[in-house]
Image (tube, helix red, strand yellow):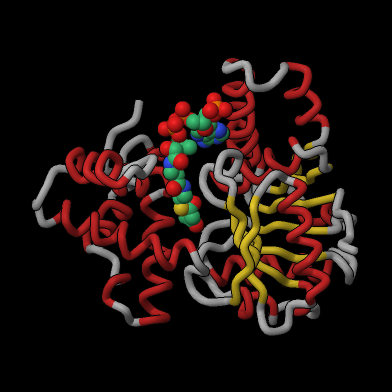
């Protein structure tokens, strides 16, 4: 029987961490959400307020339910507040050295049976697991953007993840109303390994001026029935995140499909990060 996890920590309250926190609190779990400083914490809280206010204004959520969601969330700037968490989900930027630092710290703070999960999109879960003294309790729990909407959770097991830990996390994903798929630790897991070659190709088509951004997106939306065209999706994912994912997959596989199109790095350097910065392939109000 899977262990019921009720006390969860989330580290990092960017687009994904805030979305994951919302999903957990909506499902009735108690969440401690940790950011690095007060400013980042306020920004993360802002993401959550924006998302839940929007649900209230659309009549999808009662105002009282929104208040209950916030009562279940403790906002903090101290990892020490995760000392009683049964599961911690890390959702900080895609940089191995930063994640490794957080995992090493969590390993010292949390009890030995706490499951340490990463929401990484492409970095090695195995590499992260070995910075802790509990590699068998380390797992990938990869949500999709926007986390409150997308149904999938990829559960990533390394060669040493305990089957019980996999079962606990699968059961949690189902309790959150998600559908889980399980995969071994390979760059990009299932969805990103298949998605990002396509996105990169669309960027290259735009960069080489074969078609306008609107026409590339319209072709895939209207011709292939996708909810969003590839360039609009790049903006949703974030140009910096997309770059990190492509770069990691390229370094692992050397498959040219994943060699980031030059314009992605240029946009990143210029601060055109997509929706989150107000401008990417498109401009946002
Ligand atoms: N937070 C919460 N809810 C949101 C939301 C957000 N950021 N964005 C949209 N929604 C909700 C809306 O409230 C609405 O809910 P209801 O139907 O209950 O009212 C619903 O989603 C549909 O939204 P909209 O009508 O505003 O817009 P839409 O129909 O165009 O849908 C979309 C928006 C869900 C983003 C849709 O375009 C879509 O599915 N796009 C593809 C997204 C995708 O592929 N994501 C995966 C990216 S890859 C990834 O995440 C992996 C990685 O590691 C980078």
Residue 136 location (% of width, % of height): 77, 78
Of residue 39 and residue 56, the one placed in the foreground of this image is 56
Residue 120 location (% of width, % of height): 57, 63
In the depicted structure, whether residue 95 falls above or below residue 136? above
Splitting the image into 4 quarters, where does residue 280 fall?
top left
In the depicted structure, whether residue 175 falls above or below residue 242? above
Say how many tags the image has: 0
Which residue appears at 70% of the width and 44% of the height? 177
In the depicted structure, whether residue 134 falls above or below residue 118? below
Residue 203 location (% of width, % of height): 23, 55
**Viewport quadrant of the N terminus:** bottom right
In the depicted structure, whether residue 8 falls above or below residue 149? below
Residue 273 location (% of width, % of height): 36, 46
* Apparent side of residue 257 relative to residue 28 in the rendered image (left or right): left
Of residue 253 and residue 220, the one placed in the foreground of this image is 220
Of residue 104 and residue 205, the one placed in the foreground of this image is 205
* Apparent side of residue 162 relative to residue 264 in the rendered image (left or right): right
Splitting the image into 4 quarters, where does residue 285 fall?
top left
Which residue appears at 71% of the width and 51% of the height? 10
Of residue 221 and residue 207, the one placed in the foreground of this image is 221
Which residue appears at 62% of the width and 62% of the height? 181
Which residue appears at 82% of the width and 42% of the height? 29
């Amino acid at each position: 029987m899977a262990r019921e996890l009720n006390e969860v920590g989330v580290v990092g309250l960017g687009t994904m961490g805030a979305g994951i926190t919302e999903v957990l609190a909506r499902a009735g779990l108690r969440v401690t959400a940790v950011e690095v400083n007060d400013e980042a914490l306020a920004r993360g809280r802002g993401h959550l307020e924006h998302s839940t206010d929007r649900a209230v204004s659309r009549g999808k959520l009662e105002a009282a339910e929104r208040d209950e969601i916030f009562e279940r969330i403790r906002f903090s700037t101290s990892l020490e507040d995760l000392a009683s968490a049964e599961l911690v989900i890390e959702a900080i930027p895609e940089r191995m050295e930063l994640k490794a630092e957080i995992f090493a710290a969590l390993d010292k703070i949390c009890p030995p049976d706490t499951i340490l999960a990463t929401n990484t999109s492409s970095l090695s879960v195995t590499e992260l697991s070995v910075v802790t003294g509990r590699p068998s309790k380390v797992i990938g729990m990869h949500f999709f953007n926007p986390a409150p909407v997308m149904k999938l959770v990829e559960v990533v097991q390394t060669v040493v993840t305990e089957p019980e830990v996999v079962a606990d996390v699968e059961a949690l994903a189902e309790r959150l109303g998600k559908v889980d798929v399980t995969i071994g630790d390979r760059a990009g897991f299932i969805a990103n390994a298949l998605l990002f070659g396509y996105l990169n190709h669309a960027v290259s088509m735009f960069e080489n001026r074969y078609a306008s951004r609107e026409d590339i997106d319209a072709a895939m939306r209207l011709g292939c029935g996708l909810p969003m065209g590839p360039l609009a999706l790049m903006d949703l994912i974030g140009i910096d995140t997309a770059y990190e994912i492509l770069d990691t997959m390229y370094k692992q596989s050397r498959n040219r499909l994943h060699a980031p199109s030059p314009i992605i790095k240029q946009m990143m350097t210029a601060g055109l990060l997509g929706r989150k910065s107000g401008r990417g392939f498109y401009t946002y109000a």
